[in-house]
Amino acid sequence: MGPLRISFIGAGNMAQALAKGLIASGVTQASNITAASPVADLHLLQQMQEMGCKVSHSNTAVTSSSVPLALLERTLGRGRRVVRGMPNTPALLQAGASVYCRGAWATDADAHLTHTLLSSVGDCYEVPEKFMNAVTALSGAGPAYAFLMIEALADGGVREGLPRALAIKLAAKTLLGGARMVLESDSHPGALKDAVCSPGGCTIAGVSALEGAGVRGALINAVTQATLRAQQLADVANTSSKNERRVTQDAVDNIVKVEN
């Protein structure tokens, strides 16, 4: 088997995160990675080149995390093997949480290859496609929620007199440590939270303030709204595809009329 060659349609944050992770993990070499993007995104291609990847302005297309398998298969042609994936930006540090689902003609070997690629930059799970919009909203968009929480916690520390750099490090390390405790123990997050909250103490006072401000509900709603948006984008992609096919068929019909 020859060297694994990987091509990215687009050269944005996700492509760069995956490329860096794949290179760092030794799955493939930078010279075997190609990124294609429009001329308008020249700065992104330059960043890929700085990693040692090949770049191109050809064979580009608009892609979205919300494009369903049926549309991809219909566009590429019947019998094409398609796997739909949703990584996230922590893949840059080989700490990603990626999910994928296989299309109608994708084989076990295709799924295995996808799992190998994505697990090289973090954890990877196969799911039914019906979960993909929720996955996009939770783990795909989730890093932004985490960054917002870190920033807000750090702002609280600064308000109480901590230097900004120290406050950011403490906030980030606290979320990282808390996440590890959830992943490396059998305890429910609620039980871990309760263990920190001493009766009448500082932590329960802070938790009470969060509950009073509706933080729990806001985070739940964030995932809900992002899921709805993912479905909207999928609907737009389907509608656009149908319109393009209608235009193509109209053009064919006109040609037939002229020839007749």
Image (spheres, helix red, strand yellow):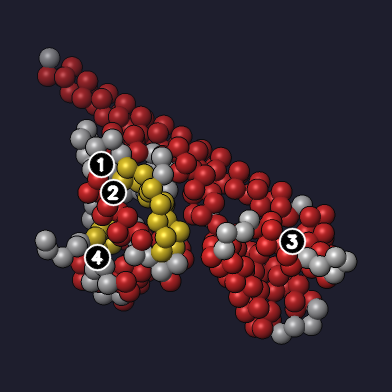
Q: Are marks 3 and 4 in contact (CB under 8 Å)?
A: no
- Label 3 – label 1 distance at C-alpha: 45 Å
Label 2 with label 1: CB-CB less than 8 Å: yes
Q: Are marks 4 and 1 in contact (CB under 8 Å)?
A: no
Q: Which residue is mark 3?
A: 194
Q: Earlier in the sequence, mark 3 or mark 4?
A: 4
Placement of 97 over or under 241, stated as above or below: below
The amino acid type found where label 3 is placed reads Asp
Residue 9 visible in this rendered orientation of the protein: no
Q: Which mark is residue 33?
A: 4
Foreground tag (3 vs 1)? 3
Disc 1 crowd, CA 10 A, few/some/many (<14, 14-19, 20+): some
The image's mark for residue 106 is 1
Sequence-wise, which precedes: disc 3 or disc 1?
A: 1
Which of the two residues, 10 or 193, is positioned nearer the viewer here? 193
User: How many other residues sit within 10 Å of disc 2, few (<14), some (14-19) or many (≥20)?
Assistant: some
Q: Position of residue 165 (x, y in %)?
A: 65, 83
Q: Tell me how far mark 4 sits from mark 1, CA to CA.
A: 22 Å
Residue furthest toward the right?
200
